[in-house]
């Protein structure tokens, strides 16, 4: 499904990027809903308004989105005073995890405000959208209940998956569950985004079409011929009586976690290698966040052609960080055991520009927000040695960022 403003058929839309003063990006978002964001430690992009939108579903969704974006940008008149990644026309995007069901969405905002390497800019697309800023509101009460999969149901699914892996059916699978939060007032996207950004400066704080979160994991960034990725897998969380340094040392020497991590790195590297003339992997090291610590590896490569970010995203998604190994068997097991629709959780989320540059994170530590309701998602990588009770605790720890931001902690 495609929708674009009627004016496109009569006159060409115009995208205009101008230099601007330094901004607090999230502070610029004018309205409680419809926030578009990709911000990390004060840099990135925010947007609002809708100059155009494209939706797609099914196995062809990446290719359809890529085609639509090329056609859309071909028809634009662009005036760009800066000419760096993220200036000129930009679409925020969030892709469904699964080939079916689930819908993917690209939103072209009317206004984009960006900041990168000390430079700031504003891009207007079409009429330029609203600017009056409404006050940010916070909920005074949030109630939680089971989502599509209860904690007990999740533990059972994990137990079954682990039994199957012990029997040799596959090596790794990632299973997730959800949790429903209902606030006493409509959830203000900006309140959640600001809470996430304050506590998780290491993460990319994102919002696209109501999917809001703070992900520590970068599926792929493309800047011209350079691509890079941050792969995470293997997790620990604060335990009584263990210092952060002890936790990090235990993570780096855990065979189970190193194994989980290796599957994720291998799945990314093997898929990306044919697109690259050079490639290097740095890791694993430990990424420490307030709620969890992860084994983390950085991958960097030089492209040997000019594939768009969406074409690369299609090839890479899902890595074994959110799917499993082997990929097809893991996807089948997720479909069979998980018992819920992931929607856009664990799918690629981020932005692309008119040159095919951009950043795709993996949509983790997030919730789908609609009115007063938020559906939170979290999952864990499982291998034959996994313990169901520990995985339940790990998924709980991964939901804390959104819960704390929603409650204003
Ligand atoms: C699946 C999630 O996280 C993924 C799974 C991890 C693990 O199992 O160790 C670590 C980071 C992510 O790649 C999630 O946050 O929901």
Image (cartoon, helix red, strand yellow):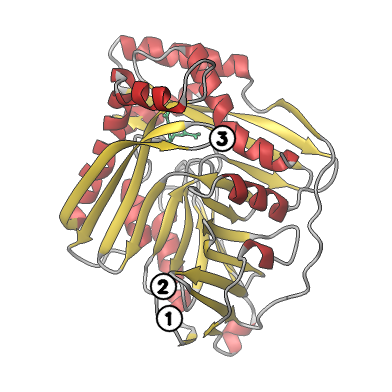
Which residue sits at x=55%, y=49%? Answer: 103
Q: Is residue 224 found left or right of 408 in the rendered image?
A: left
Q: Is residue 215 found left or right of 170 in the rendered image?
A: right
Relative to 354, residue 171 above or below: above
Q: Please state the horizontal and vertical placement of residue 211, each as a whole percent of the image.
A: 61, 49
Cβ atoms under marks 1 and 2 closer than 8 Å: yes
The mark found on residue 341 in the picture is 3
Q: Please state the horizontal and vertical placement of residue 304, each as a whole percent of the image.
A: 17, 63
Cβ atoms under marks 2 and 3 closer than 8 Å: no
Residue at image mark 1: 74
Q: Quadrant of the N terminus?
A: bottom right
| Residue 161, quarter of the rendered image | top left
Q: Is residue 386 found left or right of 139 in the rendered image?
A: left
**Measured Cα–Cα span from mark 3 to mark 1:** 35 Å
Mark 2, secondary structure of its residue: helix
| Residue 359, quarter of the rendered image | bottom left
The mark total stands at 3
Q: For this rendering, which residue is in front, 165 or 116?
A: 116
């Amino acid at each position: 499904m495609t929708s674009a403003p009627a004016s496109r058929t009569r006159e060409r839309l115009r995208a205009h990027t101008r230099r601007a003063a330094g901004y607090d990006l999230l502070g610029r978002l004018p309205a409680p809903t419809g926030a578009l964001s990709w911000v990390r430690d004060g840099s990135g992009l925010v947007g609002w308004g809708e100059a155009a939108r494209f939706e797609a579903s099914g196995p062809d969704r990446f290719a359809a989105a890529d085609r639509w974006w090329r056609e859309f940008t071909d028809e634009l008149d662009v005036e760009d005073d800066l000419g760096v990644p993220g200036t000129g026309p930009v679409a925020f995007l969030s892709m469904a995890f699964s080939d079916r069901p689930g819908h993917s969405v690209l939103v072209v905002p009317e206004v984009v405000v960006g900041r990168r390497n000390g430079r700031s800019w504003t891009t207007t697309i079409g009429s330029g959208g609203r600017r009056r800023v409404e006050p940010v509101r916070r909920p005074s009460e949030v109630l939680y209940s089971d989502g599509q999969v209860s904690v007990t149901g999740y533990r059972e699914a994990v137990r079954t998956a682990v039994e199957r892996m012990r029997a040799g059916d596959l090596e790794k699978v990632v299973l997730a569950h959800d949790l429903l939060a209902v606030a006493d007032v409509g959830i203000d996207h900006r309140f959640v985004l600001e809470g996430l950004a304050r506590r998780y400066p290491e993460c990319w704080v994102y919002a696209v079409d109501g999917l809001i979160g703070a992900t520590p994991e970068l599926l792929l960034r493309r800047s011209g011929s350079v691509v890079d990725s941050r792969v995470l897998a293997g997790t620990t969380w604060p335990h009584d009586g263990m210092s952060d340094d002890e936790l990090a040392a235990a993570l780096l020497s855990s065979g189970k976690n190193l194994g989980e991590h290796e599957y994720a790195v291998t799945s990314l590297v093997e898929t990306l290698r044919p697109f690259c003339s050079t490639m290097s992997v740095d890791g694993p090291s430990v990424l420490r966040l307030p709620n969890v610590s992860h084994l983390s590896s950085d991958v960097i490569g030089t492209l040997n052609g000019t594939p768009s970010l969406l074409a690369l995203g299609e090839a890479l998604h899902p890595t074994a960080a959110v799917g499993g190994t082997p990929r097809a068997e893991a996807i089948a097991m997720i479909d069979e055991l998980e018992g819920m629709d992931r929607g856009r959780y664990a799918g690629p989320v981020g932005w692309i520009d008119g040159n095919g540059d951009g950043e795709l994170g993996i949509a983790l530590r997030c919730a789908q927000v609609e009115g007063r309701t938020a559906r939170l998602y979290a999952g864990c990588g499982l291998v034959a040695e996994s313990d169901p009770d520990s995985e339940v605790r790990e998924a709980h720890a991964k939901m804390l960022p959104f819960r704390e931001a929603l409650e204003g902690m």
